[in-house]
Amino acid sequence: MIWTALQAELRRELTQMLRYPTELLSEALVTGIIFYGIFLGSSYMAGGSILGSRLSEIIVGYALWTLMLGAIGNMGWGISMEAQNGTLEQVCVGPLSLRAIFALRSLANLLYDLLLTAMALLLIIVLTGHRIDFSLLEIVPFILGIAVSIGIGYLVASVTVLVKRSNQFLNLLQFLLLFLVMTPFTDLKGPLRFIAVIVPAGPQMGVLRHLAIGQSRFPGEAMWLLLAVVNALLWTFAGYVAYGRVHELARSRGSLGHY
């Protein structure tokens, strides 16, 4: 049943992508232009162009940020739209739980997000003239980062189930997430660097940052990869449990389908 539902969500995502190609192109263009604006602003504040490893770090962090936003927003806006359309309760009485449905939608939406990010990265490379060499090892922290975003997506969905409208909260969250992703917590000195263990995608971004600047082998790499797994499990479990509790609370109040 899970596989059938995933196939249905993939077909749904592919159909929408083919039917509205201008949406994908527009989003990729806007994403690339926003980064270029950040790049120009940072260069001006730094008193010169940002080149080399520092630019690679910023580009990789921005790519992870866009992927995570897709998974988080899909759950928050998804529940809000279902409630607005009056179909939230219908989805809840189906054979699959709402938690499972939105997890499958996030996985299916990942196809769209990967294509969007790839197009935006291509535009960024053209605009900045900076080339990034990706290694297969970078796939692991990217996947773990997406797992974190699904957990945060469940937390956002928990808020949306109760208040029904969370658009402004999501807008605020995207800037907070950008700050967390761009801050090099793993490079802090002493015990402070282990704050990255509880920061969403902190260890994942640390591994990606070192790989992006060519340090495929750095002290503690295996440790940070392990902590990235712990970080992904922590946020996914927290979000999954929190949504389950809030969902049952909304059902007991009879406010699940309200808007």
Image (spheres, rainbow, N blue to C red):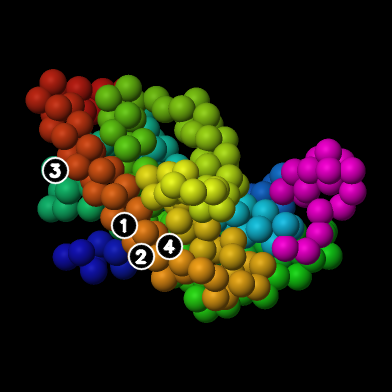
Could you tell me residue 246's position as x and y percent? 20, 31
Query: Residue 226's mark?
Result: 2
| Magenta-colored stretch includes residue 120 | no
| Residue that sits furthest to the right in the current view | 48
Residue 136 % position (x, y): 52, 78
Q: What amino acid type should be assigned to the residue bearing mark 1? A: Val
N-term mark: 3 or 4 = 3
Q: Would you identify the image quadrant in which residue 129 lies?
A: bottom right
Residue to which mark 4 is pinned: 224
**Residue position for label 3:** 93
Q: Is residue 48 magenta?
A: yes
- The residue positioned 38% from the left and 45% from the top of the image is 198
**Cα separation between marks 4 and 1:** 10 Å
Mark number, residue 230: 1
Q: Give the extent of the magenta segment.
A: 35-53
Furthest residue in direction front, as rendered: 190
Q: Residues within 10 Å of mark 2 (few under 14, many from 20)?
A: few
Cα–Cα span, label 2 and label 4: 5 Å
Mark 2 touching mark 1, by CB under 8 A? yes
Residue 150 vs residue 95: left or right?
right
Q: Nearer the viewer, mark 3 or mark 2?
A: 2
Q: Amino acid at mark 2?
A: Leu
Q: Residues within 10 Å of mark 4 (few under 14, many from 20)?
A: many
Label 1 to label 3: alpha-carbon separation: 33 Å
Q: Where 30 falls versus 209 (above or below)? A: above
Residue 215 to residue 70: above or below = below
First-in-chain label (4 vs 1): 4
